[in-house]
Amino acid sequence: MNKRKICVVVTARPSYSRIKSALSAIQEHPGLELQLVIAGSALLDRYGNAVDFIEKDGFPIAAKVFMVLEGENPTTMAKTTGLGVMELTNVLYNLKPDAVVTIADRFETIATSIAAAYQNIPLVHIQGGEVTGSIDEKVRHANTKLADLHLVATEDARERVIKLGEAKDKVINTGCPSIDLAKQITEEPGLNFDPIEKYGGVGKSLDWKNGYLVAMQHPVTTEYKQAKQHITESLKAVKELDIPTFWFWPNVDAGSDGTSNGIRTFRELEQPENIHFFKNMEPVDFLRLLKGSKALIGNSSVGLRECAYLGVPVVNIGNRQHRRNRAENVIDVGYDKEEIIRATRQTMKQEHFPSSDLYGNGDSGVKIAEILATAELSFSKTITY
Amino acid sequence: MNKRKICVVVTARPSYSRIKSALSAIQEHPGLELQLVIAGSALLDRYGNAVDFIEKDGFPIAAKVFMVLEGENPTTMAKTTGLGVMELTNVLYNLKPDAVVTIADRFETIATSIAAAYQNIPLVHIQGGEVTGSIDEKVRHANTKLADLHLVATEDARERVIKLGEAKDKVINTGCPSIDLAKQITEEPGLNFDPIEKYGGVGKSLDWKNGYLVAMQHPVTTEYKQAKQHITESLKAVKELDIPTFWFWPNVDAGSDGTSNGIRTFRELEQPENIHFFKNMEPVDFLRLLKGSKALIGNSSVGLRECAYLGVPVVNIGNRQHRRNRAENVIDVGYDKEEIIRATRQTMKQEHFPSSDLYGNGDSGVKIAEILATAELSFSKTITY
Amino acid sequence: MNKRKICVVVTARPSYSRIKSALSAIQEHPGLELQLVIAGSALLDRYGNAVDFIEKDGFPIAAKVFMVLEGENPTTMAKTTGLGVMELTNVLYNLKPDAVVTIADRFETIATSIAAAYQNIPLVHIQGGEVTGSIDEKVRHANTKLADLHLVATEDARERVIKLGEAKDKVINTGCPSIDLAKQITEEPGLNFDPIEKYGGVGKSLDWKNGYLVAMQHPVTTEYKQAKQHITESLKAVKELDIPTFWFWPNVDAGSDGTSNGIRTFRELEQPENIHFFKNMEPVDFLRLLKGSKALIGNSSVGLRECAYLGVPVVNIGNRQHRRNRAENVIDVGYDKEEIIRATRQTMKQEHFPSSDLYGNGDSGVKIAEILATAELSFSKTITY
Amino acid sequence: MNKRKICVVVTARPSYSRIKSALSAIQEHPGLELQLVIAGSALLDRYGNAVDFIEKDGFPIAAKVFMVLEGENPTTMAKTTGLGVMELTNVLYNLKPDAVVTIADRFETIATSIAAAYQNIPLVHIQGGEVTGSIDEKVRHANTKLADLHLVATEDARERVIKLGEAKDKVINTGCPSIDLAKQITEEPGLNFDPIEKYGGVGKSLDWKNGYLVAMQHPVTTEYKQAKQHITESLKAVKELDIPTFWFWPNVDAGSDGTSNGIRTFRELEQPENIHFFKNMEPVDFLRLLKGSKALIGNSSVGLRECAYLGVPVVNIGNRQHRRNRAENVIDVGYDKEEIIRATRQTMKQEHFPSSDLYGNGDSGVKIAEILATAELSFSKTITY
């Protein structure tokens, strides 16, 4: 039997975490051959060099694509995407996959979608149908309209993609593969490593054994000028809370310079004693760190997805996750030091929440691989209404 | 009062015809300043050099963008689009418009959409919400999901865009500006020029005064290998019909080489006495030519739009216009010589059809300009459900 | 033993003819592995689709690179080159060759040079050190300054490259591999095929058995506006000479549209009975055709190289080959019908010339392969003075 | 009289310093119109955002070009250059200058050269003919071969460009405009500002009034892996010297990440008390800082040019300036802590050196403008031998 060649394009560190269990399942499936393409910020040292973890995890890489223009503003985001279309078109032309997988809604994911759709290669979109604010919202639904098969993460998302005019049998709720990793670590929980010892990072050493916070806040592209101000509110809140905190650098987006600048400036001026900064962490270690934390602060989608399953309290700041499905573990607050402090203190009072299966129950990777192996693949469609 | 700067990006000859009356109305509107960008095949001699007509029509051109890669296959289509994103991003960055207009659904129109949306410039999509086959179908709806304001051409399209999750007050049926031109020529109909004398073209001279056909058949991208075979069936049909026919070369698309090749080969081998070939014609002249014809044969959207208003019979071949709204003037046939002959003979029997306002009644350009001058412009949105 | 990986980048039909024997010798050399990259117009149907001949000749292709922008003007030439740098950089990054070969002086060859030199890959330049007019002159010497090893075609060229500040031991006269093919066909000369039967082409059938001309005239980029006028003079001359002529379409260059246009217009208006047009021909067949001809007319470098070895009379038009080394077989004329006619009549009077070894004696391919296998490869150099 | 439009493309902070007096002179010349293009790292915050200084200096900017790909390795350097060709081609196409000026030898300067030369725009190369190590050496001489007019900085360079086959009357020694600025500050010397107060920077405050060093060390592209080790030797030497030192971050080059990393790591681990780090400084302030220093340490060309004129002692590390003309103020050392310490101590013993006019005597800007206004401009040339 000819194996189906499945090309998965990973363009950023968080996308890798989110797709990893599906990559494993594709690799192990007897009917599938994995063609893994690593592109964009996943190749860059400044954004945590995800490619190193990927290689360490044993995934062979079919192609590496440098496509990020410096500048981190809306103009370079657009040009990065255009360059991505050109580069990924080459890659797909040479790999000749039977299907291409594009993940979620980062701005450059539409490059994968165009490269596949225009070359008449069946396009599978993972994690469509969700709702948020910012440019991601436009990109996600545009990806849906370019894709032929939709593997969504929630029931709500499934219904929305169908409302968008996609055929019912082309929209399948597989849950989110990020939950698979979360499930795995709940089987043997506990922080089995010292974060600072293992990952270095910068900042003072922390006495985290009696409880700590995790923070991760990305710039929101449509508010890119306020990025520095927003991050500063959060940093002040965490400093004032005076609880040991592991803080993760933002990913590459317009404005991340505002955010990064904000962090750097705050460090120089305030020298916060209770914050230690990391660029990156292996996904499994990161989930363990979350599981062991008192709360996650920031605006990462991890708060809504993995933390729902893990039951970790989340203080979700601003409108980056606007309208994305959330379980009871999330408190929403504005870009305001006082609000952040109040919400964090409140949510830390209680124990963790019960696990929610809103984003799946830990077998998404296997489901995705099976669908990719058996679904009818086509590249032509018409809206259902 | 500051004039709103409206940047319209025209990437191909047919898009120009379709938007011309709106360009005039924008130019004349006291509250608007037109920034006209000419890109893609509209700059190329091989595709009729639309830019010459545009300059002759008196529109000042703010920027010209060479972005078409040679090859005319799905790979170069995708790369052209990627290059278009990069180039148009530069252009918009420098022009700093208050809104950008992207037209309809050609593959490269998504480049305009990305360049605007990613740079937080309000994006206006003209002629969304329609339904067809081929890659255009994906591109059109993706454009809708990237756009902030939707000026559609039919009621049916208006409803569809709203179903796609766009806010009702952001979706307005203006009719199609191409009808404005059609209205203009019906005011003083009649072929007031000799096509061959005025435009040259290649092929024998024709005695067209006692009736003639017009033919225009584009390749369908998802069937690109069959392009040559499809065009040959149509050519054979027209040869056998033995009625004087003006045939227009296809526009730039993957497979147009198949189509062009088919035409060239047929000319060399069959030397059809009743077909004269043109590359291009001024829009007004083209509409007069249509109005005076017995029927239009092919798969151009002109058959469904302008011909509905003009009442010209249309033999619509294949699935390029699959599911697009049509009035009673259209007969659909397959890629089959006999079917084409039969339908043409049948439809020519009768007089022209009564004018239909399915795609508007001739004032779209003015409506569009007025909306662009007064509508609230934003670049942030969330799906309505 | 590890084989050295030699990446040869072929960007156009004539470059292939010129390098073919070296490709064979590399492929057969026990110490070398050939990585053949086909790019630019060598992939395009409009320019004779050299890639088909290459595959038919049995060379495996490591990568294909679409990089030609439509427009055929100085602006798209420059953009094609920029795109070529980006694309070829990717290709070299992935192929990881031990050395890269760039050929001669076409405008896009500098893309290969930059992609290699900037990535610290030893760059071998073939056919540097010659002198001509037009942009090629600048490109050729810039290639020399980017290259680490120079395999030139004449003694004169060897001396010039050394004068340009290259180390003596890095400049080797191998002769031109195009002569290898010429030598091969002189071993069993005679036209063993009917050109029209084998290659089709367009135009009337010709009675060529009693003598014929071959014509091949490219646009000269710095004179690109005059291209149409120049080609028309040549066409008029050939028509008036009234000798059966096989005419080859020009390659892709700025202005080739002027040249192509000129040819098309002339054909339509003048319908020359004595000219048959071809897009392409297999190199060996082309050389046989030349060998059997009374003279070559035009401005191709074939007239100075292969024809010197073959002893074929050449009427060289204009300044495209300005100052390139020539043997006694060449008469230079201006862009002037009368001059062309006069020179052609004069040179046809005599028999062919004795073979000249100015550009080598038929073993260049083997020499080149041997040098590539044994030379010290480095990517760092400093000017010698 | 029509003013000649002179387009100057500045792609990096140091190029601006080097050309500034010529920009002023062009702007003030009655026969010239300046079209200033700011591109590449000159637009980027990470590299000191030269564009801010340029705007503050009152130069209107005709176009900004984002073209730097992230990654800072040889592959992204090459792709940045390719992108630069495409982008700058657009810019020149729209600006339609009478001549284009490309500066010196940074890797991306060849993009300017190609964009101009291929579009038949006369190309003026500033500061050709010098000799160094690394990729700059190849790029500089390739620029020479693409350029039509050569305004060099030393007699030695003038002779070398002529040896490279350029016509004598096209090669003029104008001196280096960077010396103009140096001359200006010698007219009223003395540090009239507090560097840390005015520019911030990072690191401890320094008591610099009793003498200080300046350090500036760039990665050398052909040795890019050793960048971190090299910079560390220098940092150790400076720490051990224990003299207050102002250290400038490197510019954007492959390996600058190695260098930057080296600096960051050293700072975290060693917390040097005597080093203060800056990203950028206004050129005039930087020259004053140099003039007031005991010595410059590193590998910047400033050490050989401006410092020759200023008479400032220089400890020049490694082979980045290999074979570039130097006056008596320079001591060359290897990448070795001990050597650096020894040379610094020795050279500090003496007073400053007498001023050398090796790179001009302070009127280069005016000379350059005058030549640009009066020289015959052409875009076609042939090698002189």
Image (spheres, coloured by chain):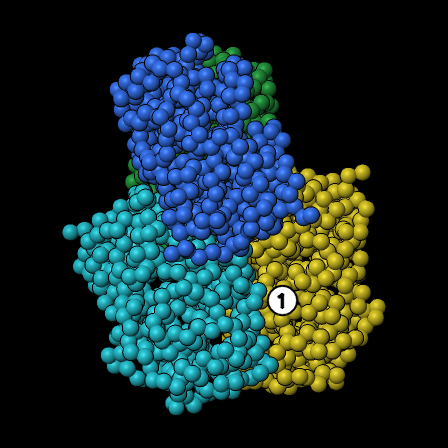
Chain colours: A green, B yellow, C cyan, D blue
The residue that label 1 is drawn on is B48
Q: Nearer the viewer, residue A102 or C177?
A: C177
Q: Amino acid at mark 1?
A: Gly
**Category of crowding for the residue at label 1, using alpha-carbon neighbours closer than 10 angstroms: few (below 14), some (14–19), many (at least 20):** many
Q: Residue at x 70, y 81 (%)?
A: B212
The vertical placement of C240 against C134, above or below, is below
Residue A246 vertical placement versus C183 (above, below): above
Residue D180 in sight in this render: yes
SS under mark 1: loop
Relative depth, front residue between D344 and A348: D344
Instruction: Say left or right for B26 vs A315.
Output: right
Q: Is residue B195 left or right of residue B253?
A: right
Residue C332, position in %: x, y? Answer: 44, 72
Report the residue that reaches farthest toward the right.
B187
In the displayed structure image, the side of residue D217 where residue B384 appears, left or right: right
In this view, C316 is above or below D208: below
Q: Residue at x 64, y 43 (%)?
A: D31
* Location of residue C278 by image quarter: bottom left
**Residue at point 36%, 60% (across, down):** C130
Q: Kindly identify which chain the residue marked by label 1 belongs to.
A: B
| Residue A145, image x, y percentages | 56, 50
